[in-house]
Amino acid sequence: MEVSSKSLQFLRTSTNIWFIVVFAGQLIFALYILGVYGVNGIAGDFERWNANTPRGYVRGDLLGNIFFGTHVALAAVITIGGPLQLSKQLRMKFPKYHRISGRIYVYSAFLISFAGFYLSWIKGSIGGITGSIFISINGLLIFIFAYYAIQQAVNRQFTEHRKWAIRLFLAMSGVWFFRVSLMLWLTIHQAPVGFNPETFQGPTLNLLYVLCYIFPIVFAELYFRARESSKASFKSLTAVFILLLTVGIAIGTFSATMGMWLPNL
Ligand code: HEM
């Protein structure tokens, strides 16, 4: 095998490992969402919606509760549907499924962000105004990427469509990256370093907002360039970088599962 095809294979393998870890982690997150919000909601035990967020359910705030309920219901749909949408095997074997679920995914992207804007600016976010600003930037990116992903599919520009779909998936995974990164940070430091756990504000959180809500798109560009580059060293270095990120994500996912998601089920 030539050096360049070996490095391309290395890049593909590291991306596949990254994807498997992210897919598994998002499935656990989806189970948590279904357990805490789905099961308790169906049982009418809405107070338990506040297990991880102070203002999920507010007695008497019908509109706010509807927005929150819609937001978490869509969160379960997109967290399971997103990785499936990127799976090449599913796309090849079931193109009709890919088109239908793609539409559901994109409409859900618009709706979940719209509900998220209401929660951030009307109901109030746990991270205060800074948290609201950053998550709203994430919401705007979701709007833009969802629009272009669907537009390029309609125009049958499938190479470009795939790139926009990857950007959309990364932006939609921002809240998951944030939870996982925060738990990784807490695992490393064994204490809330660089932020106040009462007010949920501080420089560490600001850095994580940027890294999780905005930076994944920069990483996507790096990946696209590495894949298209003729330089084997660029491909290999990017593959190593993706593997390192995957180790961090795996540790953060394990901590989030044990410390945040499983105990609330
Ligand atoms: C697109 C992917 C998204 C997913 C999967 C998602 C998921 C969730 C989940 C599960 C919760 C409940 C809290 C928890 O149990 O952890 C939540 C709360 C919340 N979400 Fe989202 N969300 C997404 C996008 C957004 C966006 C784009 C915004 C803002 C524009 C937003 C704003 C909020 C707010 C304000 C809350 C209330 C909790 C808080 O104060 O932070 N979300 N979200």
Image (spheres, helix red, strand yellow):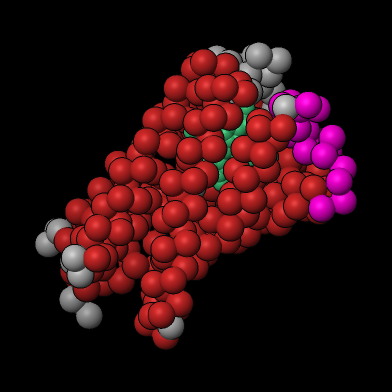
In reply to whether residue 125 is colored magenta, the answer given is no
Residue 79 lies left or right of residue 244; in this view the side is: right
Work out whether residue 115 can be spotted. Answer: yes
Residue 17 lies left or right of residue 50; in this view the side is: left
Front residue of 236/63: it is: 63
Specify the quadrant of the image occupied by residue 89: bottom left
Image x and y of residue 208, in percent: 49, 29
Specify the quadrant of the image occupied by residue 118: top right
Where ligand 1 lies, by image quadrant? top right
| x 54%, y 38%: residue | 115
In reply to whether residue 56 is colored magenta, the answer given is yes
Image x and y of residue 79, in percent: 56, 55
Work out whether residue 211 can be spotted. Answer: no
| x 26%, y 65%: residue | 153
Q: Which quadrant would the N terminus be assigned to in this image?
A: bottom left
Give the magenta range.
42-60
* Predominant SS along the magenta part: loop
The vertical placement of 161 against 244, above or below, is: below
